[in-house]
Image (spheres, helix red, strand yellow):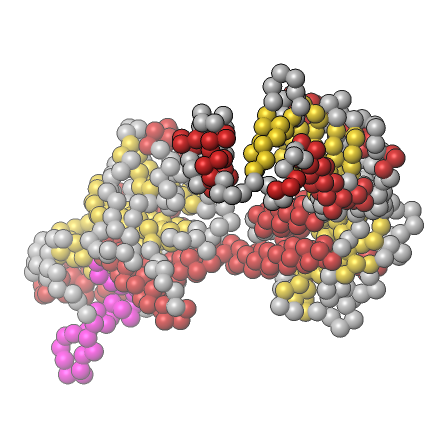
Amino acid sequence: MGWSVAAEHLFGRTAAHVLGSSVFEVVGSLARGRAWRIVPLVQEPRERTWGVWQDKDEGSAGGGNEDLLSLGEAILDAVFTQADVGLHFLDPQLRVLRVNPSAIGMRGISLENVIGLPAVEAYASIGLRIDEGMLREVLDSGRPARDVLLRGRPAADPEREHVFSVSVYRVRNGAGRALGLVATTVDVTARERAQARLRLLHRAREMIGRTLDVERTARELVDVTVPDFADSAVVALTDAVLQGKAPELAAVDGEMLLRCAAAGSTRADCPPPPTGSTLLPALFGPKLPSSVAILPAEGAHSGRTPYGPRLVAPLSARGQVFGAVAFERLRGGEPFTPGDVDLAKSITTRTASSLENALRFTREHIVMTALQSWPIGQERQTQRAAEIAQRHRPGGSGAGSWFDALPLPGARVALVVGQVERPGLSAVATMSRLRTAVQALTTLDLDPHELLARLHSTVLRLDREQKSMQGSIDEPTVHCTIAVHDPVSGRLDAARAGRSLFAIVRPDGTMDADPLPMGPLLGGDGPPFASTSLVLPEGSTVCLASPAATREQGPTRRGLAAALAHPHHGPQQMADDVQHLLAPDRVLLVARTRRLPPDEVAQWDVPPELRSAGPAREQTQTRLQEWGLDIAPFTAALVVSELVTNAIRYGAPPITLRLIRGETTLTCEIDDAALAAPYPRHAKATDEGGRGLYICATLAKSWGVRYREDGKTVWAELDSRTTGPDAG
């Protein structure tokens, strides 16, 4: 009726060849002179189960069932008396019938206290909570329960909690009737403690040092270790570390001023020291510990406190001391072991490394904040061209964003917003250097596109310097938008590198959210950059902002329109409405354009004849008297005469003379259609000419040339503070 795999190996035939055949035929054909025994295995009146096996002793072939029963008892006795695994046999009523010595010894209980009692009652005396429902389910269903963990304190070791792995199996006879349960128990305390240490260490690596903040790192150490490792923890740091300064070196006597940075306890009746309080050295022993150690309970924290011995550990890295930590467990609880010492060393080493990173970040953050908050220096000349509002939404990551409003000759203003990619201290340092470069390049009167091209070359040079000095492989790239507004003509020239926010709102409320397409980044693909030239009506609003890291973080077109489409709002209110849409560490510049009043600008067409210099001098002197500027008329007339003469001789018509009045300055501008660049000469004593620009450079505060597509403008600025009435 049945043929096992062992039978196949023993007889050399598969089940398909023998099933349904007579046992005597199968055995007889394979006997080959050997003796076989066929005996009933179970004595049942209705049904018998027979077994067939080779008899080693032919004379004892008739022993049969008694020998088999004796063998089973012998095996059972051997297992119960010699196995290292705890064995428990329960009857169908879940009473303990038999327990092997290993199980007794593991729990330190006598046999008389267990045999005959229900399992739940028998093991409750040693602190093991047996789930009777689980035992009933195994007995009814036959499905074994494996590796069920139970915790208790056996009588042999009452001071330590042990963990046992219990597996329960149902026992049946040949007829299928349940005879009871067999439970195996293995002490897995060492395994569970090792896994618990690994879990705690993994949690420490995941949680400690996430914030790059000194005090939060100390708090994270307490949160990780209480109550999983200790019932109380106190983290103390030196004053230097708490102030963000460099940590102190290890002192020979171990005496340092420590303050409580974080503490936690499971006992409400024994609170830890408050945060910020000065801690006595006795908490960590006679002096600050240099290695992890277990201290006895006697001392400052013994006596009335419920805690036992302490485990103290230093928080140090590379000879620098950040502080120390003390762990305590309740009296009567698990004592600290060498394994706990190793675990505490790993956790405190991790914490010290995190504190070092946090201090480095704090120092870098101080530097970044100082550089990032570099004031733009509001100039009164700037306000003549536009009413400006700035905002900086701090975030602490050092995004390298900056903005500037720079006054230019001719009452113009340059609006600049930029941002260096890859946040960090190097980004903020690069930002500072680029900001200085922009201020220097604007003195050259370059148009915005040409200025971005020069700035692109500067970024590439900085990249080469960083690679040669630091071996950095990260190439700095920069977003930058520059817009120059002329309050005389209302013209706005703009160029854009990257994807900085750039929007224009006209006085009628219409908004152009993208007047310029995105261009390549500075330090990336390079020129040409997107550029445009617009004539804006007075009262238009120009909005510039550094871009977010991703498009999702930046303001949406709808949100930007809702914040800006209010021409009756002033720049300050518009800046407030847009600021909350920005990502952290981003800057915003809002400028409301203005036009110079007609009485502050004088302009004449100059005929291309040398005799036109005389009328130009007279017109200049007359206008100076009307304006009442404290500038010598002869000086202004001389400068205008030289500029007009140079334009007639070396320029091309049409020629236009423009005077722009400032509070203490007079700007003289000559427009002509030639692109040849004037330059000052050093004339010889016998030369009749060549001194015009030299005279202008000597008498004027500053002078320069700016180019247009259809010509150039030569200008000179006179200041009453540098030219007196008798300067002529």
Of residue 10 and residue 707, the one placed in the foreground of this image is 10
Q: Is residue 681 magenta?
A: yes
Regarding residue 655, the answer to whether it shows in the image is no
| Residue 601 percent across, percent down from the top left | 26, 48
Q: Which residue does the image show at 59% across and 25% down from the upper left?
A: 49
Residue 468: quarter of image: bottom left
Q: Position of residue 26 (x, y in %)?
A: 46, 33
Q: Residue furthest right?
A: 303
Can residue 467 be spotted in the picture? yes
Point out residue 206 in the picture as x, y percentages from the top left corner.
Answer: 57, 47
Q: How many numbered discs?
A: 0
Residue shown at the point (70%, 69%) measured from the top left: 250
Part of the protein shown in magenta: 680-706
Position in image of residue 288 (x %, y %): 77, 64
| Left or right position of 6 against 349 | left
168 in the magenta segment: no
In the picture provided, is 453 more to the left or to the right than 123? left
Q: Residue furthest bottom?
A: 685
Which residue is at a point 33% across and 42% down the rendered structure image?
501
**Image-based side of 570 in relation to 487, left or right:** right
Does residue 145 lie above or below 470 as drawn? above
